[in-house]
Image (cartoon, helix red, strand yellow):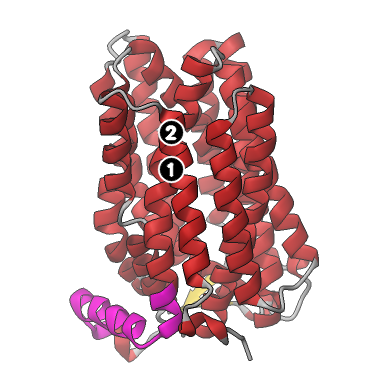
Amino acid sequence: MEAISDTSKTVPVLKNRNFLLLFIGSIFSAPGYYIYLIAAEWLMLTISENRVYFGMLFFAASVPRLLLLAVGGVVADRFNKRTILFIADSLRALFIAALLLFLYLNMVTVWHLIILAALFGIADAFSYPVTNSMTPLLLEEDQLQQGNSFIQMTMQISPILGPALGGVLLAVLGFKGVFSVACVMLLIGALTVLFIQLKQEKEESDAHSPWKDLKEGFLYVRQSDFIVSIMFIAFFINFFFSGPFSIGMPIIVKDVFDGSAISLATVQTAMGLGAMLGAILLAVKKVTNYRKVILVSLLVVGCLYTFIGMSNQLYMSAILVLCMAVLLQFVNIPIFTILQKTVDKSMLGRIMGLLITVTTGLIPISYVATSTLIALGVDIRYIMIGGGIFIVIIAMISFNFKRLRNLEIS
């Protein structure tokens, strides 16, 4: 298990050297990641008219991520988290460099993009548990909501700066310029986290086998009514939201709004801006009634998502996406804060890995189902409307979950 050095304790969040380095590293790596994503999405739409391939791009990234997230959680608890983040961001930069080489050789095909998506999914499986379990090692318990909010700000700057910069670079420099910038930003992010000071503490549990560590994580989850309830809700929410929204918005922008890469960047920037605004609000205001905030926000998210499917105007859709993104933060940040406060730090990597594994478990199926419905001729807008209705239903049912009625943090 890792612990922070004594110099990073009992200081304000943004004056904490280690946390500030994590903060700065995220500012570079997260936008760089999204610059790559928007360019890869638009490149796929450009080189192939078959929208099934576009759905496969998401499926290829989600499958290895799903299969390896639990393993990534075990690795996060057994090895230095700083090193894991450095390796993950460095590998992403290397993958983009490989794509640049194929671009210069004029050899890029849909299968190159799909394979790279799978490699990014593997890197994600090891970085996600670390990212969501590192903050408690850098901050005091009463600073966690604020710290999580700041990290979410940096992560949500990515859908703002990433698509905006990516769209501009596509128009000015083309795909080579976009991928070059993304590669450099990920390298800077990787180098920044190397300066975080974490010390490794020796524990008897270090002798445990990885399989035993994984089993301990499963047993820990089974003993927590809150974690089980959250997994149940998020499992189905992700099915109705992730596939239709991720695949649907680029298709709607191109095929319904007859938009360009800049149009897609507008919608994705609205998503990032809304998420950042939600994170800012939670950085300055502490949540008291977690159950009410989480479930009411989820209910309204479902309504807004339904309206997005009905919208026929680009800017109206962008506004709805912005509002929805604000409220999604009022679901996500309180959940992670509760887990970081209540879960033993020696188990946090595994719990985060298992939580993300279960909550994203239906995402690959969601991508396949969405792509299949599109291939069968179902309008993507009807798919999104149906998904929004189901999210509303799930939120209403969740109000009656006994396990969530008395959700408090002592």
Q: Is 364 drawn above or below residue 224 in the view shown?
A: above
Gap in Å between the C-alphas at discs 1 and 2? 6 Å
Q: Main secondary structure of the magenta part?
A: helix
Report x, y in % for residue 124: 38, 50
The verdict on residue 227 being magenta is: yes
Q: Is 371 drawn above or below residue 201 in the view shown?
A: above
Q: Quadrant of residue 27?
A: top right
Is residue 182 among the parts visible in the rendering? yes
Give amino acid for label 2.
Tyr
The verdict on residue 129 being magenta is: no
**Nearest to the observer: residue 264 or residue 182:** 264
Q: Is 124 drawn above or below residue 341 in the view shown?
A: above
Report x, y in % for residue 268: 59, 33
Q: Quadrant of the N terminus?
A: bottom left
Q: Quadrant of the C terminus?
A: bottom right
Instruction: Give the residue at x 32% y 60%.
Output: 69
Instruction: Give the residue at x 38% y 77%.
Output: 228
Which type of secondary structure does the marked residue at label 1 adopt? Answer: helix
- Left of 373 or right of it: where is 388? right
Q: Are marks 1 and 2 in contact (CB under 8 Å)?
A: yes
Disc number at residue 151? none
**Nearest to the observer: residue 201 or residue 309:** 309
- Left of 297 or right of it: where is 355? left
Residue pointed to by mark 2: 382
- Badge 1 crowding class, 10 Å Cα cut-off, few under 14, some 14 to 19, many 20 or more, is some
Q: Is 366 drawn above or below residue 220 in the view shown?
A: above
Give amino acid for label 1.
Gly
Instruction: Give the residue at x 32% y 83%.
Output: 222
Residue pointed to by mark 1: 386
Q: Which residues are magenta?
A: 207-229
